[in-house]
Amino acid sequence: MNRIHALDALRGLLLVLMTINHLVWISGGNTFLQYFTLQPLGQVGAAEGFIFISGLLAGLIYSADKYSNKQVVSKAVHRAWTIYCYHIICLLLVLAVAWIAISIYPSARDVYQTSMPNFFQAPEHASWLSLLLLNRPAYFDILPLYIIFMLVLPAVIIAFRRGYGWLALAVSVALWLSSSWFTQTSLTGLYQSVSPALGISVGYFDPWAWQLLFMMGAAIGYGKRQQSINWYASNVPVWIALIVVAAIFITHHGVFLSMGIHQGVLYQFADKPELGWLRILNLLLWVYLLGFVISRWPNALNIPGLRLLGRHSLQVFAWQTLLIFIVAPYLQQLGDSGSYTLWLILLTCTLFIAAFIHQQWQNKQREKVQQTTPNLA
């Protein structure tokens, strides 16, 4: 099956949106760009779409018939290990960046202490807890989620292959429904037994809830691989989805403020950390509509620059994580200046440099393999 370039482009776009939002949040600035980057389409954001597409691609790739169940396990574990290495390397680099920045500019301590508090209160304990993924600074949420999801993915693929896909999805939905029962406070005893100076810091997203996005994506990816799903046999569901999306969109943007319906009201049903039902519905509707566009016009969303980012999403995401911590103290000083938005755009453009560098490295690796492969002709 050929690579779906539109999905790479969409993932690249979501990386751009997340980077701009992270730069703004970590520096405490304000920009009109967030009108377009922060939930512009309704009660759904870039992170949800990013995880869903990653699950879809994982289900599509790892369910290939050429991979035995044993190979699926091996490949998924290897991928999880790769993501773990990127996560730890990024964390070590961020710690080094923070130490250097504070040494040069002592005022930068406030910025980093807010984003990574445990490393200032109990650095030794925070470090080894981080190795266990039980301590995560701000903006270090996504990769640990991927590690967990990739380790579970083989069981999901095998379940689908054996006709128990319904059971895998039922378990996923049950975990989502019960996710509010698993709170971070349950880790208080563990943290306090390690060090009373530690605060609970395991991330913004509830993994018990957010696994549902990845698993739904994986299920659709598996169905696409088996060509067992025809979502667009009729245009009627497309029109219904479009009407519902439009209703959520205009409500999200304040059309019914006079009736007391605003984003705060919607958020009661679209909680982000716990993944409220309205957030899931909003995402699935957009997925359905974008899938329709891709099926009818395959090249409509195929944007080369964004496609490049999506193809190298792990490396690009790792770079943006490092980038926001490098520039945070300096961006904070520009928060009220006219150049703040310009700097956000310029810094975000460095994502393309990271993707290009990794693309060139991959090309060189392929050339080496070709040169060392015996000519059997």
Image (spheres, rainbow, N blue to C red):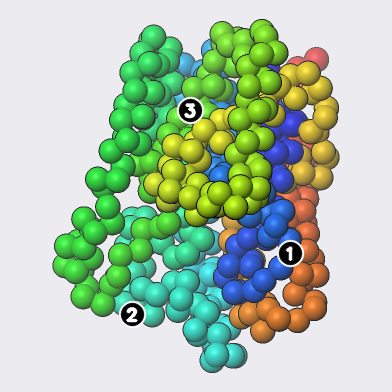
Determine the residue located farthest toward the front in the rendered image.
Answer: 258
Q: Are marks 2 and 1 in contact (CB under 8 Å)?
A: no
Disc 2/disc 1 C-alpha distance (Å): 36 Å
Coordinates of residue 160 in the picture (x, y in percent): 42, 15
Residue at point 80% right, 70% down? 342
In the depicted structure, whether residue 104 falls above or below residue 128: below
Coordinates of residue 291 in the picture (x, y in percent): 68, 24
Tag 1's secondary structure? loop
**Of the image marks 2 and 3, the number of the one nearer the N terminus:** 2
Q: Which mark is residue 32?
A: 1
**Of the image marks 2 and 1, the number of the one nearer the N terminus:** 1
Tag 2's secondary structure? helix
* Residue type, numbered disc 1: Phe
Coordinates of residue 289 in the picture (x, y in percent): 67, 27
- The quarter holding residue 97 reads bottom right
Coordinates of residue 268 in the picture (x, y in percent): 43, 48
Q: Quadrant of the C terminus?
A: top right
Disc 1/disc 3 C-alpha distance (Å): 33 Å
* Residue type, numbered disc 2: Gln
Q: Is residue 372 left or right of residue 170?
A: right
Disc 2/disc 3 C-alpha distance (Å): 39 Å
**Of the image marks 1 and 3, the number of the one nearer the N terminus:** 1
Between residue 304 and residue 76, name the one nearer to us.
304
Q: Which mark is residue 320?
A: none
Task: Estimate how packed mark 3 is, as few (under 14), some (14 to 19) or many (20 or more) residues with alpha carbons within 10 Å.
Answer: many
According to the picture, the residue beneath numbered tag 3 turns out to be 216
According to the picture, the residue beneath numbered tag 2 turns out to be 121
